[in-house]
Amino acid sequence: MNSPGPAGDPGEGLAGGQGEAVMVLRRAVAGDLDRLVELDDLVLGTEAWPVEVWRANLADPAQHYWVTLVGGVVAGSAGIALRPSWAGIMSLAVDPAVRGHGFGRRLMERLMADAAEAGSKRVELMVQAGSVPAMTLYRSLGFAEKGLVRGYYRASGQDGIAMLAELA
Ligand SMILES: CC(C)(COP(=O)(O)OP(=O)(O)OC[C@H]1O[C@@H](n2cnc3c(N)ncnc32)[C@H](O)[C@@H]1OP(=O)(O)O)[C@@H](O)C(=O)NCCC(=O)NCCS
């Protein structure tokens, strides 16, 4: 699949007439599968989910996946699992070509709204230790660090940091 539209020009497709960001957000569908896998590979490398995992997660009614589009191409994705007693962020990835334009925050705000609408009292996630952009975003949304899990990311051997947000 092709790269997202703005790969050569990070601004193209992002600016509206007044210089405002135009952000398209929608639920992910089965037809997004190839691009989601491609984006995952690009962003997460060895920690990316195999296509079978993506297919199963997209088909799971207890998981919500959202995508942001630039020029009609998926440029970011995020997902949450909503179980009766537990909600957990499953994924968050934004194409490096379009970072810093608010896509990650918009995706996370949508997931947190999903959790609130589902009646979740708290949301958990695991993040790679040292992922400053992601951790800064999570802290700004009310997440606090709960613990370190050494070697959580098996392919890379990186440690994971568990974070938790209490919902009002
Ligand atoms: C984390 C990630 C999704 C952020 O996406 P993004 O679209 O660039 O984020 P946004 O532009 O919406 O920025 C949201 C916030 O993230 C934080 N942030 C983003 N880039 C940052 C950077 N380089 N340094 C520090 N904080 C940063 C800021 O708190 C920012 O807040 P602001 O809205 O006040 O500017 C993106 O960097 C990414 O895909 N990283 C790799 C994958 C990853 O780490 N996923 C999380 C797995 S748990």
Image (tube, rainbow, N blue to C red):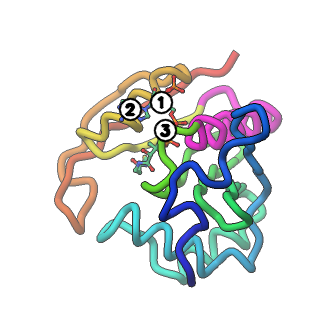
Cα separation between marks 2 and 3 = 14 Å
Does the beta carbon of the residue at mark 2 sit less than 8 Å from ligand 1? yes
The question of residue 119 being in magenta is answered with yes
Cα separation between marks 1 and 2 = 5 Å
Rendered image: mark on residue 100: 3
The question of residue 48 being in magenta is answered with no
Q: Residue furthest right?
A: 117
Q: Does 106 sit left or right of 141 as displayed?
A: right
Rendered image: mark on residue 138: 1
Which is more toward the observer, 70 or 126? 70
Q: Which residue is mark 2?
A: 135
Does the beta carbon of the residue at mark 3 sit less than 8 Å from ligand 1? yes
SS under mark 3? loop
Does the beta carbon of the residue at mark 1 sit less than 8 Å from ligand 1? yes
Residue in the picture at 64% in, 43% down = 107
Indicate the quadrant where residue 113 lies.
Answer: top right
- Residue 162 spot, x, y in % from top left: 37, 37
Front tag of 3 and 1: 3
Query: Is residue 93 visible to us here?
Result: no
In the rendered image, the vertical position of residue 2 relative to residue 75, given as above or below? below
What segment is highlighted magenta in the picture?
102-122
Asked if the residue at tag 1 contacts the one at tag 3, i.e. Cβ–Cβ closer than 8 Å, the answer is no
Residue in the picture at 66% in, 21% down = 167
